[in-house]
Every structure is written in C-alpha cells, then in structure tokens.
C-alpha cells in the first residue's frame, strides 16, 4: 500500500547483500498514523545485530494533493516516547555537526536509531543541506518553492563564475528555518509538491 508495489523479497535480498558487504546502510521510515506504526519496533530490531541506522521521519506535507495538516500527531518526541515505552534504556547519542537527525542507541545493539523532525523543523539552525530537483530548481530548504533555476542558467550558457555568484546569493538569502521558507511561498502550499518531484 505504501510503496505501490510488492518488491519486498528483492529489497530484503539487496539489504542482506549490503550488510554482508559492510556497506553502511540507512533505512528511512516516514511515520504515518494508522498506516505503519506497527513497523516501528520491528525496524528497530534490525539494529540489534546489524550496523544499520534506522531513521524515523516525521510526516511532511509534500503529498502532491494540495492538502496540508496544521497539526501532526506523531511528532519526533512522540516517536521517542513510544520507543522508550518498549526500550526504557534508549540512550541519546551526540549528534555530528550539521546533523538533521537526533540520534539514539539501544545498549547492546550494533546499529543506531535516528529521529528527523521534518515537520517540527527543530534542526533548521544547523542544517546545511541543499537540493536540486530533476527540473534544475535549486532549493535551500525542502519547504521553499525553489530559489534559483540552475538549469536555465546553464542553458543560457552562463559562465561558472556567474553561476557561482547566483549560488552564493541564494545561500546568503536562505530562510532562517523551514517555517520562514514556507511563509515566503505566499499562497503556494508545499502540499502541492510531492517528494518524488522534489527528489526525496
């Protein structure tokens, strides 16, 4: 239902090959009320014997349907509380610089667990991420509607120096956080976009 296709066996086999090849693996899971809450604990159990990072992401409004909820039930704090009910010894880890996740570990488990406050947007002050969509639109925040079209600059045969100036200008005018980035959109809601078009 969530992936719109049944490719579990292929995906599981690929995951096993990655683990056996000692390739670092992160599994991102968007937590959605009424759809996959029962998957939280089994995903955590993957970290028991595997060097996997399982990251739980707050659901964002990028659904392409134009509908935007004002409140989110399963915030990152509720996810942590839910995990702590089952793993009371959950340990908070130090987050690396510019981390977009709050990181945790269950003592004795090989892997770790992260929380990404994508809707609450509490990590914006340390985020250094940028994104270029498939259409060449440069985004300094998931919640903005694009601050520069790099594709157009390249098609206009702008020099590297000119493109650099445009990029630096975009960096300098970056919104303070995702709430400001969303407010700058005006009447255009982020819910009209989907993560597949943004590149996530």
Image (cartoon, rainbow, N blue to C red):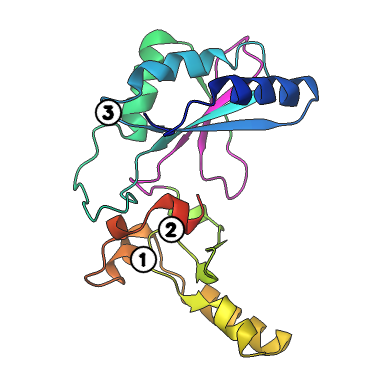
Is residue 63 a member of the stretch shown in magenta?
Answer: no
Circles 2 and 1: CB atoms closer than 8 Å:
yes
Residue bearing the label numbered 1: 181
Q: Nearer the viewer, mark 2 or mark 1?
A: 2
Mark sitting earlier along the chain (2/1): 2
Is residue 114 a member of the stretch shown in magenta?
Answer: yes
Residues under labels 3 and 2: Cα distance?
22 Å
- Residue at left offset 45%, top offset 48%: 123
Residues under labels 1 and 3: Cα distance?
26 Å
Residue bearing the label numbered 3: 33
Look at the picture and state if 198 lies above or below 61: below
Which numbered marker is on residue 94? none
Helix, strand or loop under label 2: loop
Residues under labels 2 and 1: Cα distance?
8 Å
Q: Residue 26 or 122: which is nearer the viewer?
A: 26
Residue span colored magenta: 95-122
Mark 3 neighbour density, 10 Å: few (under 14) some (14–19) many (20 or more): few
Q: Residue 112 or 145: which is nearer the viewer?
A: 145
- Residue at left offset 55%, top offset 15%: 106
Point out residue 88 in the picture as x, y percentages from the top left corner: 43, 10
Q: Residue 170 or 67: which is nearer the viewer?
A: 67
Mark 1 neighbour density, 10 Å: few (under 14) some (14–19) many (20 or more): many
Left or right: residue 184 compared with residue 108 = left
Point out residue 73 in the picture as x, y percentages from the top left corner: 23, 33
Quarter of the picture containing the N terminus is: top left
Mark sitting earlier along the chain (1/3): 3
């Amino acid at each position: 239902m969530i992936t719109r296709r049944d490719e579990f066996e292929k995906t599981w086999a690929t995951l096993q090959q990655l683990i056996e090849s000692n390739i670092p693996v992160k599994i991102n899971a968007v937590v959605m009320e009424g759809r996959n809450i029962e998957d939280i604990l089994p995903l955590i159990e993957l970290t028991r014997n595997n060097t996997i990072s399982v990251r739980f992401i707050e659901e964002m409004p990028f659904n392409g349907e134009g509908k935007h909820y004002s409140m989110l039930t399963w915030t990152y704090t509720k996810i942590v509380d839910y995990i702590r009910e089952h793993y009371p010894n959950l340990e908070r880890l130090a987050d690396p610089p510019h981390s977009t996740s709050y990181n945790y570990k269950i003592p004795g488990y090989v892997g770790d667990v992260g929380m990404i406050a994508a809707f609450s947007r509490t990590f914006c002050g340390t985020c250094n991420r940028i994104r270029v969509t498939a259409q060449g639109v440069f985004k300094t925040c998931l919640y903005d509607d694009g601050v520069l079209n790099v594709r157009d600059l390249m098609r206009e045969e702008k020099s590297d120096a000119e493109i650099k100036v445009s990029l630096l200008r975009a960096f300098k005018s970056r919104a303070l956080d995702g709430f400001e980035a969303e407010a700058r959109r005006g009447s255009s809601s982020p819910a009209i976009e989907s993560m597949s078009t943004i590149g996530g």
